[in-house]
Amino acid sequence: MRTVSEEKNSRQQQEFITVRSLPGVGSAIADKLEAAGYVSAWSIVVARPEELAEKTGLPVLTVQKVIEAARKALGITFKTAREVKQERLNIRKITTGSRSLDELLGGGVETKTITEFYGEYGSGKTQLCHQLSVNVQLPLEKGGLEGRAVYIDTEGTFRWERIEAMARALGLDPDKVMDNIYYMRAYNSDHQISIVDELFTFIPKNNVKLVVVDSVTSHFRAEYPGRDHLAERQQKLNSHLHQLVRLAEAYNVAVVVTNQVMARPDIFYGDPTIAVGGHVLAHTPGVRVQLKKSKGNKRIARVVDAPHLPEGEAVFVILEEGIRDSEEQ
């Protein structure tokens, strides 16, 4: 069995096969690809040919050849179920700070997928985002990824004071922790989309292992109100979410998004709240987790949808020092 260090080195070697090292890709083509944000082979294979051609100005035929070269370099072909299993075993996870919540998530928030936390105001969504932005910097053996975080804030809820408190509670230097969190305030949906597009260039240069979008639906919901704009909103949101999926897969990063809820007047029994975003958001994240308020500082997390996880619940608390287990557990 490989050591943690060997596993990390092997993963990094594959992740950062550059476009310049691909057979048949000359400096002129590489310059255009890099200028458009396509630096690694992984960023090439997860992009659509039309998208690459549009952003780089290269002919579609040239782009298709580059994609094929990237696929060969990464060994992308049919795989056996055992090989798929091995890839799943190599996915890394970030601790939430709560053992109970980690167990619910199968070990923590995982890379190469989107994890969505949705719930009403005060349910702990933003607190979790802050905690994960700190925890991703921890060593592998302590549940971190020894990496940095990108925090895209659409509602102005990021608080550096919480980062400081959480860092101190873990015995970390607050200033160093804050230096490793790249913050960007997104002011509208177009700005939000452009920030994510820029990450294809930014991530490989800055050892980013976590991307947070808090909240992913806020601007779309505000800018496209009513049924008249629903189709346009969903199409734009769908494209944005799939760009986040490509980002997660291209660079083996964890992507965490938060989402709002709304009440359904036609539900008379049980929980009348549902996540915003409809079927588009329901089918894109790899893991969907509903958060609910409980007594005092307690919160309840419930796995709503995940292909590899059973449905279940976990209780955690929000303390001054961050996300922790409830004392009753």
Image (cartoon, rainbow, N blue to C red):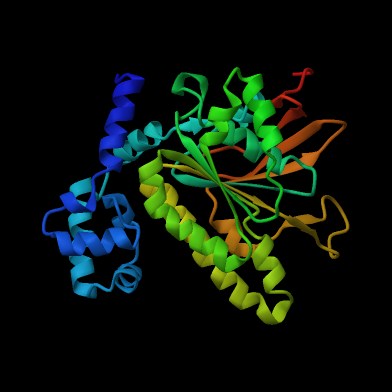
Above or below: residue 313 compared with residue 120: above
Q: Quadrant of residue 63?
A: bottom left
Q: How many marks?
A: 0
Question: Which of the pair 193/225 is nearer the observer?
Answer: 193
Q: Quadrant of residue 252?
A: top left
Above or below: residue 121 compared with residue 87: below
Left or right: where does residue 246 sit relative to residue 319?
left
Q: Residue at x 65, y 56 (%)?
A: 154
Quadrant location, the C terminus: top right
Quadrant location, the N terminus: top left
Left or right: where does residue 150 sit relative to residue 10?
right
Question: Which of the pair 303/53 is nearer the observer?
Answer: 53
- Rendered location of residue 206, percent (x, y): 40, 41
Question: Which of the pair 158/210 is nearer the observer?
Answer: 158
- Rendered location of residue 12, percent (x, y): 30, 35
- Rendered location of residue 20, percent (x, y): 18, 52
Q: Residue at x 68, y 74 (%)?
A: 224
